[in-house]
Amino acid sequence: MTLTQTPAAGMTRLPAAAGAIRRLYRVAGVDISLTGTGISTIGGTTRVPTAGRRADSLVERDARLKHITSRVLDEVGAVDLVCVEGPVSYQQPGGSTWDRAGLWWRIVSSFIGREIPVAVIPPTSRAKYATGRGGARKTAVLEAAQQRYGAILPTDDEADALILRAMGLDWLGQALASVPDGHRAALGGVRWPEMEAAR
């Protein structure tokens, strides 16, 4: 059984067989960051904080990326879908731009290597799903996530990860909570993977 895309809606639906009982999907949300990667799974949310210095050597920078990637893979484990926030564009790239891009690809490539489908969610879609506004700040997303899902979230990194996970579950027809149609329209702007339906 395969999930197929509906062009008009930009979203997909799992075909429902009469009398079929579907198990709950295992979905993870990962907000990739050098300083604090947020992770949301069925077990809750967590954050991988790290710090670097401009004077760090290539070996030290590589070790940092490896550490973050390893922690993310350990926390996520075996899932049916991973939702990651897409890269942001920087008009004036800072010194860590290469490291941010390298970390993003290292983590995404690791999931692909494990044959885990990956959905790439633009930052504006994540904000719109949470608040109804694509330009909403992280603090607004944090407040909305806590109110809608009743979660205690210490950081906006974890709030972003929870929203990413919620979007994936909603796309699969197993929403964590009901959201207004205007918010839910954000699912149409996501790059969803082609994937086999979990049995």
Image (cartoon, helix red, strand yellow):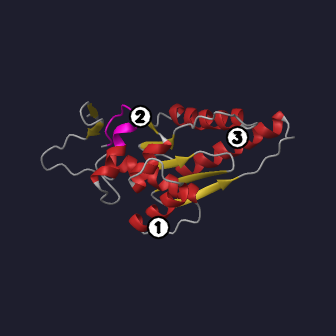
- Within 10 Å of the Cα at label 3, are there few (<14), some (14-19), or many (20+) other Cα atoms? some
- The disc, 2 or 3, on the residue closer to the chain's N-terminal end is 3
Q: Looking at this rendering, what residue extends furthest in the left direction?
A: 18
- Image-quadrant location for residue 87: top right
Q: Earlier in the sequence, mark 3 or mark 1?
A: 3
* Residue 32, above or below 109: below
Residue 117 at x, y percent in the picture: 44, 36
Res. 2 in view = no
Towards the viewer: 139 or 96: 139
- Contact, mark 1 vs mark 2 (Cβ under 8 Å): no
Q: Quadrant of the N terminus?
A: top left
| Badge number at residue 66 | 3
Under mark 2, the amino acid is Arg
Between 71 and 131, the one lying in front of the other is 131
Assign a secondary structure to mark 3. Answer: helix
Corner quadrant of residue 156: bottom right
Can you tell which mark lies on residue 151? Answer: 1
The magenta-colored residue range is: 187-198
> What percent of the width, then of the height, locates residue 30?
53, 47
Camera-nearest label, 2 or 3: 2
Task: Let me know if residue 182 is in the magenta part.
Answer: no
Residue identifier under label 2? 191
Q: Is residue 17 above or below residue 2?
A: below
Q: Position of residue 38 (x, y in %)?
A: 58, 53
Label 3 to label 1: alpha-carbon separation: 30 Å
Q: Is residue 69 left or right of residue 86?
A: right
- Please name the residue shown 54% across and 65% down the image: 153
Give the Cα separation between the discs numbered 2 and 3: 26 Å
Q: Nearer the viewer, residue 197 or 52?
A: 52
Tag 3: amino acid: Lys
Q: Is residue 184 left or right of residue 81?
A: left
**Magenta stretch mostly in which secondary structure?**
loop
